[in-house]
Amino acid sequence: MDRLLGRLRFTCAHELGHWVLHQKLYSGTGDVAAYEGKTSLDESHGLVEWQADALATALLMPLPQIKRSFYRLRAGRSNEQLVAEMAQIFQVSKQAMRIRLETRNLI
């Protein structure tokens, strides 16, 4: 799969995350949960971005399917080969797949 397509898919899912999770923030119709209890705009902005990334990750690389693919494919493959093959299957960038696997302690 084209690397740029994987990045585009993640970017679209990330922006969808903003729309779903932070609609009030962008429409000016009220407070948003992401901002509650935060002391600075920078801290809140980081949380908003993290939330959008988390939603994009869950949409494009659902954990049950990630684990199933990982355990099915891991034998005889290096981490690099595994990341590349799974990125192709899930149509995401290798970087996104590596982060997903690392944060779940699979590689």
Image (spheres, rainbow, N blue to C red):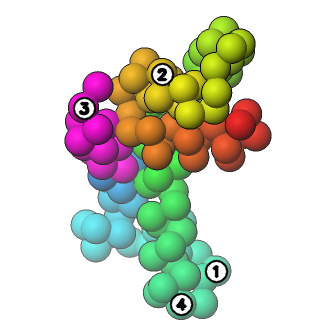
Q: Which residue is mark 1?
A: 37
Please state which amino acid type lies under the numbered disc 2.
Glu
- Quadrant of the image containing the C terminus: top right
Could you tell me residue 50's position as x and y percent? 52, 61
The total number of labels drawn is: 4
Residue 106's disc number:
none
For mark 4, what is the residue?
A: 40
Give the main secondary structure of the magenta stretch: helix
Q: Which residue is mark 2?
A: 85
- Circle 1 Cα neighbour tier, 10 Å, few/some/many (<14 / 14–19 / ≥20): few
Q: Label 3 near label 4: C-beta < 8 Å?
A: no
Where disc 1 sits, the SS reads loop
Task: Tell which circle, 2 or 3, labels the residue nearer the N-terminal end.
Answer: 3
* Separation (CA) of disc 1 from disc 2: 41 Å
**103 sits to left or right of 19:** right
* Left or right: where 81 falls relative to 79: left
Question: Which x, y percent locates residue 14?
Answer: 36, 50
Q: Secondary structure at mark 2?
A: helix
Q: Of helix, strand and loop, which one carries label 4?
A: loop
Q: Determine contact: label 2, label 4, CB under 8 Å.
A: no
Tag 2: Cα neighbours inside 10 Å, few (<14), some, or many (≥20)?
some
Residue range corresponding to the magenta coloring: 1-14
Query: Which numbered marker is on residue 2?
Result: 3
The spot of residue 34 in percent (x, y) is: 53, 68
Is 99 located above or below residue 77 in the figure?
Answer: below
Seen from this angle, which residue lies furthest top?
A: 72
Sooner in the amino-acid sequence: mark 1 or mark 3: 3
Q: Give the crowd class for mark 3: few <14, some 14-19, many >=20 residues within 10 Å.
A: few
Residue for point 35% across, 64% down: 24
In this view, the mark in front (4 or 3)? 3
Q: Is 2 displayed left or right of 84 in the figure?
A: left
Image quadrant assignment for residue 1: top left
